[in-house]
Amino acid sequence: MSLPWVERLDMVNTLAPMAPELAVQLEKHEQKRANVFKGNAKLPYVRPEEDPVLNDFKREMLFHRQAQSAVLEGIPMLQQLGIKTRRPDDYFAEMAKSDEHMQKVRSNLMAKQQGQAKSERIKQIREQRKMGKMLAKQTKVQREAEKKDMLDKLKKFRKGKLKNLDFLEDAKALESKQKKTAENRKARNKKFGFGGKKKGLKRNTKSSSAGLDAEKSTRRQRGAKAGASVNKRMGKSRRIKAKGRK
């Protein structure tokens, strides 16, 4: 067929030179295969020239180098013929997937990312709790050790092995420091509380004021009844008898 080369695009060329990264990759692959034969005595040894796995890898590399050579020679030929080989900047291809499908894909990816971030936060919280428990345990052990050390020194002083009580001064300083820290903590708790709204809790409201007034009025009524029973005026006949007695 006598078609122009633009229609045929056939080329006969040699292999492109091997890139350094491909040479390193081939060397690593050969070393890996050698380690497989060396570590497994049940596998029969095969020379690298006859190894089918290595041959397949080398064959793929030959295809790759052949394609590279075709690109390096074909692109300049197309440019000489005035054929564009790159898409314009304002080129818009039709999407194979609809926008709704891509939105679903994006939402799934976002959900996965959020799940991973949440699991990471939970893991960090667990690590922080674990570290807090470890620090609390270390502090407790340290205090017990200091207390035991002080008691041992006190026993030695009683037996006459120590001549002074300087260790008690250190213990008092440590105790005063701990007491001061506890007092500061109590002051902060009293000022700021343990969470929730503390300001205005004792302020009266309409309902509380009405309830308090009702309670006061009830007390007044009870007091009035009690006073009436005590200061009740005697009847006329009793008043006359009382005057006659005088």
Image: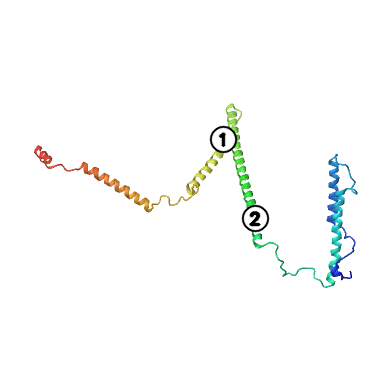
* 135 or 204, nearer to the observer: 204
- Residue under the point 48% across and 48% down: 191
The reply to whether dot 1 and dot 2 touch (C-beta < 8 Å) is: no
Give 240 or 105, whichever is nearer the viewer: 105
Residue 175 locus on image (x, y percent)? 54, 39
Residue at the top extreme of this rendering: 159
**Residue placed most toward the observer, 112 or 142:** 112
Question: Dot 2, how many residues are within 10 Å of its Cα: few (below 14), some (14-19), or many (20+)?
Answer: few
Q: Is residue 155 left or right of residue 42?
A: left
Q: Label 1 neighbourhood size at 10 Å, few (<14), some (14-19), many (20+)?
A: some
Residue 228 in the image: state x and y as whole percent.
22, 44
In this view, the residue farthest toward the front is: 1
The tag earlier along the polypeptide, 1 or 2, is 2
Color theme of the render: rainbow
Q: Nearer the viewer, mark 1 or mark 2?
A: 2
Q: Amino acid at mark 2?
A: Asn
Q: Position of residue 143 (x, y in %)?
A: 59, 36
Q: Nearer the viewer, residue 204 or 153?
A: 204
172 sits to left or right of 87: left
- Residue sticking out furthest to the left: 244
Left or right, 86 with respect to 17, comes to left
Q: Which disc is residue 168 wearing?
A: 1
Quadrant in the picture for the C terminus: top left
Three-letter code, disc 1: Leu
**Image coordinates for residue 57, horizontal then vertical, percent:** 85, 52
Q: Read off the residue under disc 2.
A: 108
Numbered disc 1: secondary structure = helix
Residue located 64% across and 61% down the image = 100
**Which quadrant does the N terminus fall into?**
bottom right
